[in-house]
Amino acid sequence: MARIPEHIARELPFARREVKVDGVRMSVVDDGAGPTLLFVHGNPAWSYLWRKLLAAGKAQGFRVVAPDLAGFGLSEKPSDPSYHSLQRHVDNLVALVRALDLREITLVMHDWGGPIGMGLAVNEPDRIARLVVANTVAFAPREARPLTRWHASLATPWGYRAAVWLNAVQRSAMRLGVARPLPRDVARAYRWPMRERGARIAAARLVQMVPDGPEHPEARTLRRFMEDYPKLAGKPMLVLWADKDRVMRPRFAKRWLEEFPQAQIRHVAPDAGHFWQEDAPELFLPHILAFAEQHDQHEAHEGAKSR
């Protein structure tokens, strides 16, 4: 495992372990004891994104788990672009959850963590207690749709080269995805894993994986997941939104109600951007922890009834 620079280590004082999944080493924060909070990041982030929520969750008596997806953070970074697909990342997460034997999970998802996390949930519904969705979507497009200007430019062959050689995905996403510029040490922490070419390949590929219509390969994968969404009909779901997101617009939150009528939708951060974990974590934290604690109380009540 790579040695973490001091300015990052101070922000990530959590126990971490490695799990080998299909021949690839995945690094995962796994700390604390109690009900499980599982955090799944997107592009171009890593477990550092969740540091403030990890600290609060652990202090509140939860087991906090946050993997670095293959190609990101401290995980191994395959150099073959074809390695990356939605199904591959789902398979990796399923294998990791089984290896750690995580159960009664409150699953917290953001960005690409949404489709990946929902893939986990439909594969392992008995391990999932609750779902928290925050500025992400996990639905196949019904018809052809234009990509955002950012996605469209980076999905081109030139954009892919710029992503791999100039780190264009990370540099632009972490600038455009926040309402206020990141502090210097925080920006350095997001750049640090991207010094490796494999990390830039992962970031570039996940941009290309955004479906622009129903025939996109990842749209077909998403449709398979959606066919299994009824397995999650009984799971409590909380949809939280930061409304200054330039990609995941506030209206996207309502899409979750179409598939999950039980979902609660709360627009909690009107002035935060896509990376609300940097702009306004304090506005999300009370909702996430209270939601997870309700589950804990429900389990205690059910246990008392059974006795």
Image (cartoon, grey):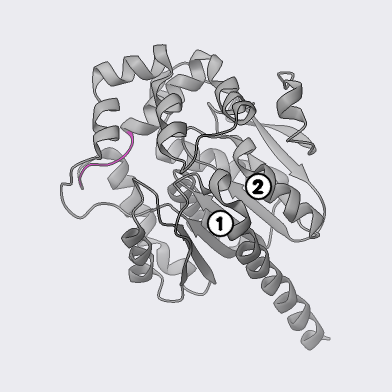
Q: Which residue sits at x=39%, y=21%? A: 168
| Nearer to the camera, 111 or 81 | 111
Q: Amino acid at mark 2?
A: Arg
Position of 54 relative to 201 (above/below): below
Q: Which one is nearer the viewer's eye here, 220 or 15? A: 15
Dot 2, how many residues are within 10 Å of its Cα: few (below 14), some (14-19), or many (20+)?
Answer: few
The image quadrant of residue 166 is top left
Q: Which mark is residue 274?
A: none
Q: Is residue 160 left or right of 216 when viewed as pictured? A: right
Few, some or many residues within 10 Å of mark 1 (<14, 14–19, 20+): some
Q: Is residue 243 magenta?
A: no
Label for residue 98?
2
* Image coordinates for residue 134, horizontal then vertical, percent: 49, 56
Whole-percent x, y for residue 204 in the image: 38, 25
- Which residue is located at x 74 percent, y 53 percent? 56
Above or below, comparing residue 149 to residue 278 in the picture: above
Identify residue for label 1.
124
Query: Number of labelled discs?
Result: 2
**Position of 229 compared to 31: left or right?**
left
When the figure is inspected, residue 129 is found, relative to residue 68, above or below; the finding is below
- Judging from the image, what secondary structure is the residue with disc 1 in? loop
- Asked if marks 1 and 2 touch (Cβ < 8 Å), the reply is yes
Tell me which amino acid carries mark 1.
Glu
- Considering every residue shown, the one lying at the far left of the view is 144
Q: What secondary structure predominates along the stretch shown in magenta? A: loop
Quarter placement of the C terminus: bottom right
Seen in the image, is 159 located left or right of residue 183?
left
Region in magenta: 209-213
- Relative placement, left or right, of 280 versus 149 is right
Q: For numbered disc 2, what is the local secondary structure?
A: helix
Q: Residue at x 39, y 49 (%)?
A: 245
The quadrant of the image that shows the N terminus is: top right
